Image (cartoon, rainbow, N blue to C red):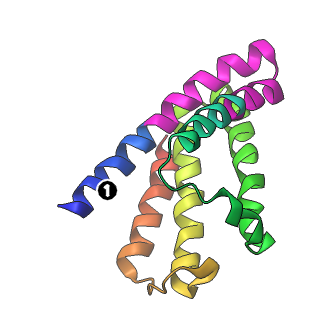
Amino acid sequence: MKHALILLGVLIAGMGLSVEAGLLGPLGEQVGHLSATLSIFMVGALLLSLALVFSPNPKLGTLFRQPRWLLTGGILGPVYVIVLTLAAPLVGIGMTMVGILCGQVGASLFIDHFGWLGSERRKVDGFRVGALVMILAAMWLM
């Protein structure tokens, strides 16, 4: 049951990313792509700051004692949002999201297979490769 709820949350979050792409495209065309990206991160930072204020056990102090490479994810977020902002109006939200999904699944197969970034090793089998091939086919069909 716990896994089903987590997967439902993942599904809903994925749907939210499509909505975000739909919002960012027109916003980027109106105010500029970098300004649109900044606005998304400013709103997110404000909401997360409020959540930390009311969090029962914030561990913000330990953040800067972590290996620096763990913080590089902060670089990837803005790159992702800028790509959404640029691509969605040009190729459509569906194609943008399928392309992003293809990249995510492809990279995740390598991360899982080799146990990179501290993740547990999960051998890539024919089913997982087949799933990636189907996503590539979906991209071609779109």
Residue at x-position 26% and y-position 63%: 3
Residue 73: image quadrant is bottom right
Residue at x-position 51% and y-position 40%: 54
Viewed as shown, does residue 59 lie left or right of 123? right
- Could you tell me which quadrant the N terminus lies in? bottom left
Identify the secondary structure beneath mark 1: helix
Residue nearest the viewer, comparing 91 with 73: 73
The answer to whether residue 119 is above or below residue 37 is below
Q: Which residues are magenta?
A: 16-41
Q: Position of residue 8 (x, y in %)?
A: 29, 49
Residue nearest the viewer, comparing 138 with 107: 107
Q: Position of residue 12 (x, y in %)?
A: 37, 41
The answer to whether residue 1 is above or below residue 84 is below
Viewed as shown, does residue 26 lie left or right of 99? right
Residue 102 part of the magenta segment: no
Residue at x-position 23% and y-position 61%: 2
Within 10 Å of the Cα at label 1, are there few (<14), some (14-19), or many (20+) other Cα atoms? few
Residue nearest the viewer, comparing 130 with 114: 114
Q: Position of residue 105 (x, y in %)?
A: 51, 63
The answer to whether residue 82 is above or below residue 114 is above
Residue 81: image quadrant is top right
Tell me the residue that label 1 is attached to.
Answer: 6
The answer to whether residue 39 is above or below residue 140 is above
- What amino acid is found at the position of numbered circle 1 in the picture? Ile
Q: Position of residue 89 (x, y in %)?
A: 66, 24
Residue 17 part of the magenta segment: yes
Viewed as shown, does residue 86 lie left or right of 56? right
Residue at x-position 70% and y-position 31%: 85
